[in-house]
Image (cartoon, helix red, strand yellow):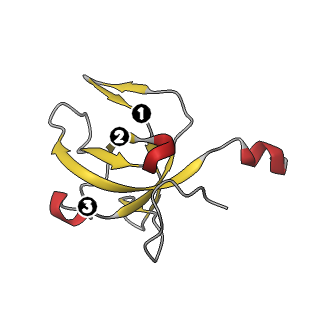
Amino acid sequence: MTISFDDFLKVDIRVGTVTAVEDFPEARKPAWKLTVDFGPEIGVKRSSAQITTHYRAKDLLGRQVLGVVNFPPRQIGPFMSEVLILGLHDAGEAVVVIGPERKVPNGQRMC
């Protein structure tokens, strides 16, 4: 399936810095509750992320990640996830988080 460039531009992918990580014991699959600062335009948002295989809480703090910020919030058990943190599956199907290789200002849109 192909999409137009205008369709692609509708997906608002921004960079943010993880400022807090909490356990999410109620999740069906192991996950973290993340708080991510997407800069002054978007603000601070929360997300549930199934990334516990490769990342400890302390490894995520201060890390920049990419997230889709214009999906509607999604209820995940007792938690409301406001953004989708992007990642890729490794050979073992565990998620590897996508982020910039160098520090960039929070809120920058992927181009």
Please state which amino acid type lies under the numbered disc 2: Ser
* 29 and 82: which is toward the camera: 82
Q: Secondary structure at mark 3?
A: helix
Q: Are marks 1 and 2 in contact (CB under 8 Å)?
A: yes
Q: Residue at x 23, y 45 (%)?
A: 30
Please state which amino acid type lies under the numbered disc 3: Leu
Tell me if 11 is positioned left or right of 19 in this view: right
Q: Is residue 2 visible?
A: no
Neighbourhood count class around disc 3 (C-alpha, 10 Å): few under 14, some 14–19, many 20 upward: some
Q: Residue at x 50, y 53 (%)?
A: 107
Please state which amino acid type lies under the numbered disc 1: Glu
- For label 2, the residue is 47
Disc number at residue 39? Answer: none
- For label 1, the residue is 82
Q: Residue at x 43, y 72 (%)?
A: 103
Disc number at residue 60? Answer: 3
Residue 49 spot, x, y in % from top left: 33, 46
Q: Is residue 35 above or below residue 53?
A: above
Tell me if 58 is positioned left or right of 33 in this view: left
Residue 19 spot, x, y in % from top left: 26, 53
